[in-house]
Amino acid sequence: MAAPYREREPVQYYQPLPASTRVVYPNNGYHLDDQQIKARQQMAHVNVVVTQPGRSVWDYEHPWSTELCSCCSDCKQCGFAFFCSCCFEYKLHKRAGEKTCTCLCPGSRFALRSKIRTAFRIQGDLIDDCCTATCCPCCTSIQLTRELHYQGL
């Protein structure tokens, strides 16, 4: 036999209190005024040291995994980068986690080189990145591809 129908209790929804209402929580029998609350909040503030003292965050300690002009050591990769540079750039940007149309933007190779150099704390500066990406585009792309492979990406 089926169980008799029971009426459900009405659902109670949370109703926010008006902004002018002050809620006082029990605090072991004593009341804290606003100054005491602010003093406790200031005491609870903790400073976190993000960097080691004496070490500059701008120091880059790693060299590139391959030299710029060692691009011809792998003839297959060198030929692909030279004869089909658009496809090679596309694969490089995709592998580096960039959007697919990024390789079409002017200066994208320079920006990608700076990104990779900074991410892996590789020695160099923006002038090196700009000159290298502008004057030796194929060698730069091959070096970036090899660096991503070296870093396990």
Image: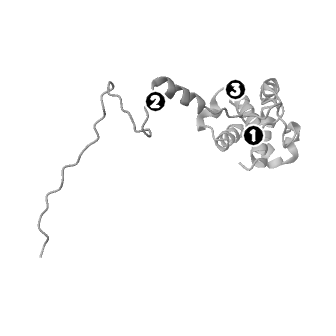
Q: Quadrant of residue 102?
A: top right
Q: Nearer the viewer, residue 16 or 71?
A: 16
Question: Going 39% across and 37% down the picture, which residue do you hit?
Answer: 25
Estimate the spatial distance between the alpha carbons at disc 3 and disc 2, rounded to whole Å: 60 Å
Q: Amino acid at mark 3?
A: Gly
The residue singled out by tag 1 in the image is 83
Q: Nearer the viewer, residue 41 or 122?
A: 41
Q: Indicate whether 39 appears above or below 142.
A: above
Under circle 1, the secondary element is helix
Under circle 3, the secondary element is loop
Q: Mark 2 Cα within 10 Å, few/some/many (few <14, many 20+)?
A: few
Estimate the spatial distance between the alpha carbons at disc 1 and disc 3, rounded to whole Å: 20 Å
Under circle 2, the secondary element is loop
Q: Could you tell me residue 53's position as x and y percent?
A: 80, 32
Q: Could you tell me residue 123's position as x and y percent?
A: 84, 33
Q: Nearer the viewer, residue 126 or 18?
A: 18
Q: Mark 3 Cα within 10 Å, few/some/many (few <14, many 20+)?
A: few
The residue singled out by tag 3 in the image is 107
Of badges 3 and 2, nearer the viewer stands: 2
What mark, if any, has residue 32 been given in the picture? 2
Estimate the spatial distance between the alpha carbons at disc 1 and disc 2, rounded to whole Å: 76 Å
Q: Quadrant of residue 64?
A: top right
Q: Indicate whether 18 appears above or below 141.
A: above
Q: Are dots 1 and 2 in contact, CB under 8 Å?
A: no
Mark earlier in primary sequence (1, 3): 1
Q: Amino acid at mark 2?
A: Leu
Question: Going 87% across and 46% down the picture, which residue do you hit?
Answer: 73
Of badges 1 and 3, nearer the viewer stands: 3
Q: Could you tell me residue 76's position as x and y percent?
A: 79, 49
Q: Amino acid at mark 1?
A: Phe
